[in-house]
Image (cartoon, helix red, strand yellow):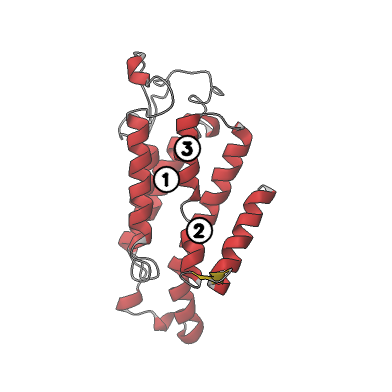
Amino acid sequence: MGIYNLLYIMFAAILGAKGHLLGVNFIGGYTTFLILTQFVHYYKYITTYYWRKVNFSHFKRDVLFFKSVALTNLAYMVLRPYWKVISAEGLAGLSSDLSLNLPGISMIAAGYFVSISATAALGVDGTYFGIELGVVEADYGFVKSFPYNCIPHPMILSQVVALIGIHTFPGVGGTVPWLVPTHVALYFLHMAQEIYDVWDGTPWYKKGENKVE
């Protein structure tokens, strides 16, 4: 988990609760906490892919930690309106405005099924830049199984589908409408970085290699 990661989360929580620090006012409440914690893993993806000078185990730990924090918050935002209604009125309190949202649930389930399948195909180390960082000895075309045999860039696109599904829930898209689009934009930014192999070195396509994403 990492002591510095925990300290950062504590700092974000305190700043979100207080809404100010050293006389400087911020966007108060939960929004500040979201801004400070939802996108850290993208920063680590992009900078690590570019510089490639990290402790691999620490990198995996950090991105898994911050991605877990982000997804936990998204799950809380999705479920909170349902919990409030059910606690107050029971299942009968669910109306057409706060239904089970089966299309959204389907997108989330399908997206994360493909994402988990992609992780299984690549392996955890391969998923987190193991080839680029020299931890996994393989070329970029070593994966031939589902979903890489039928979906381009399945790791990222599947999570984008799941995030769009999350956005359809009133506790997310109806409350913080900019949150999921920011996630999606950062995922696409990183996908472009991977496609064109933007890093502090020679791109894969100039080495005559086949890249898998």
Kindly identify the amino acid type of the residue bearing the numbered disc 1: Phe
Image quarter for residue 18?
bottom right
Q: Are marks 2 and 1 in contact (CB under 8 Å)?
A: no
- Is residue 154 visible to us here? yes
| Identity of the residue drawn at 48% across and 18% down | 138
Q: Position of residue 176 (x, y in %)?
A: 37, 67
Q: CA distance from mark 3 to mark 2?
A: 17 Å
> Circle 3 sits on which residue?
47
Lower sequence index among marks 3 and 2: 2
Question: Viewer-proximal residue, 99 or 183?
Answer: 183
Image quarter for residue 166?
bottom left
> Circle 2 sits on which residue?
36
Q: Residues within 10 Å of mark 2 (few under 14, many from 20)?
A: some
Lower sequence index among marks 2 and 1: 2
Can you say whether 132 is above or below 41 in the image? above
Kindly identify the amino acid type of the residue bearing the numbered disc 2: Leu
Q: Secondary structure at mark 3?
A: helix
Can you say whether 196 is above or below 68 in the image? above
Q: Are marks 3 and 2 in contact (CB under 8 Å)?
A: no
Residue farthest along the right direction in this orientation: 3
Question: Viewer-proximal residue, 131 or 83?
Answer: 131
Q: Residues within 10 Å of mark 1 (few under 14, many from 20)?
A: some
Q: Tally the marks.
A: 3
| Identity of the residue drawn at 52% across and 28% down | 130
Q: Is residue 131 left or right of residue 173?
A: right
- Is residue 76 visible to us here? no
Label 2 vs label 1, nearer the camera: 2
Which numbered tag is attached to residue 113? 1
